[in-house]
Image: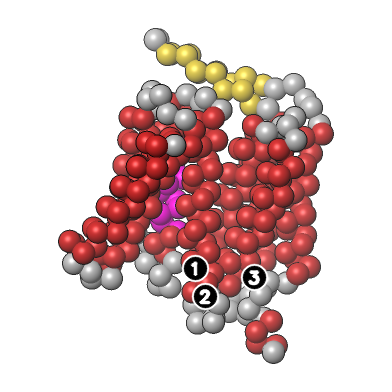
């Protein structure tokens, strides 16, 4: 009985982590401050980025989540002296992505629904990352599947939110490249080995960024845009996993092609 309990994070530490991050997001709704506009002016190019309290608190929440997850991971029975960087990646991205739609929903009654959903996402990701620290744990397979699903959902939420906010291509393209690359890197590392597929992650990030850039000026709704960009991330990551397992290329391509057809077909008819 004690062994099964040790596979779950401390409720006290988990509670403090989640409460601290949620408090950070809650403050952005009730505190209003003037924003600061950061601008870049070059010959033939001008870009202004409004830096508000929400922007700062989102970055702060992501940093707070990384520190809190590291503190949580050090309490794991299987924790060792080696760094826990891989277990900080998805929780940090989760906190960052949560802040994007919450900023857009500020002042709307839907903010509370996003706040509760964000709390559920963050709790699930932190708990799953804690469990995944021990690949021999009975719940490891479930935690791996949950982290994979949440990772793709986070990417879809982020890309959809950026499209909904009307972000310019100069912001959307690097955001897609960085987040897609990090998500694919973490998902590919969930095979239980210490292998980091940086070439695949960089390639997947570049392809997703190129597709997002190409679709930026198309008359697509935010959901259509999100599905169209998330589909290649999922398909290419699946292809990389299959090839790593020595599955022949023709067989390995069947699943990714089905995903692309279904996702892009859904994007067309939505």
In the image, residue 213 above or below residue 60 = above
Q: Quadrant of residue 106?
A: top right
Left or right of residue 28, residue 257 in this image: left
What is the x, y in percent for residue 5? 69, 81
How many neighbours does mark 1 have within 10 angstroms: few (below 14), some (14-19), or many (20 or more)?
many
Q: Going 21% across and 64% down the picture, which residue do you hit? A: 251
Q: Which residue is mark 1?
A: 144
If the image is split into quadrants, where does the C terminus sit? top left
Q: Quadrant of residue 214?
A: top left
Secondary structure under tag 3 reads loop
Residue range in magenta is 175-186
Q: Going 54% across and 82% down the picture, which residue do you hit? A: 138
Q: Quadrant of residue 207?
A: top left
Q: Residue furthest top?
A: 44
Q: Which residue is mark 2?
A: 140
Q: Which residue is mark 3?
A: 74
Left or right of residue 75, residue 221 in this image: left
Q: Nearer the viewer, mark 3 or mark 2?
A: 2
Contact (CB < 8 A) between labels 2 and 1? yes
In the image, residue 238 above or below residue 102 = below
Kindly tell me whether residue 12 is visible in this rendering.
yes
Q: Mark 3 vs mark 2: which is more N-terminal?
A: 3
What is the x, y in percent for residue 170? 44, 26
Pick the residue in front: 138 or 93. 138
Q: Going 57% across and 23% down the picture, which residue do you hit? A: 49
How many callouts does the rendering have? 3
Q: Main secondary structure of the magenta part?
A: helix
Secondary structure under tag 1 reads helix
């Amino acid at each position: 009985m004690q062994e099964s309990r040790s596979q779950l994070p401390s409720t006290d530490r988990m509670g403090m982590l989640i409460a601290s991050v949620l408090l950070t997001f809650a403050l952005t709704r009730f505190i209003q401050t003037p924003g600061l506009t950061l601008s870049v002016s070059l010959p033939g190019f001008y870009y202004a980025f409004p830096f508000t309290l929400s922007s700062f608190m989102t970055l702060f929440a992501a940093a707070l989540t990384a520190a809190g997850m590291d503190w949580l991971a050090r309490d794991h029975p299987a924790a060792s002296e080696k760094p826990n960087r891989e277990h900080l990646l998805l929780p940090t991205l989760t906190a960052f992505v949560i802040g994007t739609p919450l900023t857009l929903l500020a002042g709307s009654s839907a903010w509370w629904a996003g706040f509760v959903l964000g709390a559920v996402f963050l709790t699930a990701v932190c708990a799953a990352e804690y469990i995944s620290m021990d690949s021999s744990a009975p719940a490891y397979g479930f935690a791996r599947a949950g982290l994979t699903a949440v990772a793709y959902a986070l990417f879809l939420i982020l890309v959809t939110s950026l499209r909904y906010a009307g972000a310019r291509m100069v912001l959307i393209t690097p955001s897609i490249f960085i987040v897609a690359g990090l998500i694919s890197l973490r998902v590919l590392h969930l095979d239980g080995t210490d292998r980091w597929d940086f070439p695949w992650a960089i390639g997947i990030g570049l392809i997703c960024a190129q597709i997002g850039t190409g679709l930026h000026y198309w008359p697509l709704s935010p959901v259509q845009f999100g599905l169209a960009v998330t589909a290649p991330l999922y398909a290419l990551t699946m292809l990389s996993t299959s090839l790593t397992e020595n599955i022949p290329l023709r067989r390995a391509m069947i699943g990714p092609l089905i995903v692309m057809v279904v996702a892009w077909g859904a994007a067309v008819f939505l």
